[in-house]
Image (spheres, rainbow, N blue to C red):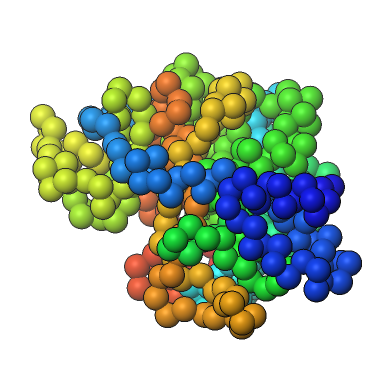
Amino acid sequence: MIDRDKAFRILSDIGQEHILKYYDELDNDEKKDLLDQIEITDFSVLENLDSEKNSDSLRGTFEPLGAVTIKDIASESSRYTKIGTDAIKNGKVAAVLLAGGQGTRLGFDKPKGMFNIGVDEELYIFQCLINNLMDVVRLAGAWVPLYIMTSEKNNKETVDFFKEKNYFGYDPSYVRFFIQDMAPSVDMSGKVLMESRSKISLSPNGNGGWFSSLVRAGLLDEIKEKGVEWINVFAVDNVLQRIADPGFVGAVIDSGLQSGGKVVSKASPDERVGVLCLEDGRPSIVEYYEMTEEMRTLVDDNGELAYKYGVILNYLFSVEKLEEICDRKMPVHVVEKKIPYMDDNGNLIKPESPNGHKFETLVLDMVHMQDSCLAYEVVREKEFAPVKNAVGVDSVESARELLKANGIKI
């Protein structure tokens, strides 16, 4: 643990000494909390406020990337499934659930995974995902190690919830929780904001921080000891997604490529979804708002959209490659946000418009750090039911309809 003098030197080097302004007025517990925050906070992200270093400002040359289509998969289904099932039986596959977010946009002030999406029955988002993974466990006759990334704000509630629900039938000895690394929030001038006299305004460092957070939590050694070679990373908010899907795992292994991403055919040229493509010859994801009109409407020789395959945040990465890229610096995205903060008089202010910046790393940048990526097309109605909003598109309502359409009692 660092002391006050070392903390002051750290902050002086980056012009953020104000973080210790009230230090002498704090009680011993508050002092310890503040010093702990200073020690674990990644202040290097502040360098990205320089627009020339901001990773959002420069993109390369995009080209379409084809996929293993639903039709291709159907013809090779048995072979892919056997390869993937064998890998799972042999302990070569683990899964990482990204569950650091709250259900704020659903009007739910708890971890999003705790949201009850059932109507006549209790059916939690976490429960949907575990049920999907249990299908694989039953097929393979082997448990898949499951690592659940939480945040500082929701870790205790998440862990307690899983214990209360007896892990929804999953073997708890195969489940590990770890907390996502945090990054400081700053005002428009680059000054780190405070939530209180003893608390820095911190936020999770984006979904791209999952592997570095897992490493920091000391879990990589365990993963390697188990002989895990592939990690399937997926987001909490898609209640239909198949996790450690043997067909997907088998197709990626069979392809000899370094990674894989599940994709769906875009519903329309203007659908607001990132597309798996090539950027400067490497796999990449172009966001819908980055695509030109020409890219959105370009068609191939078959009359299909060239930039057709939308990502659903379900990726398979090689552990060996993840270790290699972990030593490289991930691009950091600077995002304007409304950030509650303590003013100079010690009052907590909740702004009505963006007043500062947060720093995020994105899993899509991990894809671009791979040499190759297999786009694996899945049936949208069977594997894509995101729960991002309370009503409307990608909502609780639409996800419930899709769950029912797939024969799941809600």
Of residues 226 and 340, which is closer to you in this image?
340
Q: Is 13 placed above or below 204 here? A: above
34 on left or right of 374 = right
Residue 316, how many percent across, how many down?
A: 52, 33
Of residues 68 and 4, which is closer to you in this image?
4
Of residues 388 and 45, which is closer to you in this image?
45
Residue 37, how many percent across, how many down?
A: 72, 56
Q: Is 285 placed above or below 401 here? A: above
Q: Is 234 placed above or below 79 here? A: below
Residue 408, how many percent across, how many down?
A: 54, 62
The quadrant of the picture occupied by the C terminus is bottom right
Q: Is 372 placed above or below 195 here? A: above
Residue 119 visible in the snapshot: no
159 on left or right of 296 = right
Q: Residue at x 57, y 77 (%)?
A: 343
Q: Residue at x 59, y 27 (%)?
A: 327
Residue 272's quadrant in the figure?
bottom left
Residue 273, how many percent across, how many down?
A: 32, 51
Residue 218's quadrant in the figure?
top right
Q: Residue at x 42, y 80 (%)?
A: 352
Of residues 122 and 149, which is closer to you in this image?
149
Residue furthest to the right in view is 28
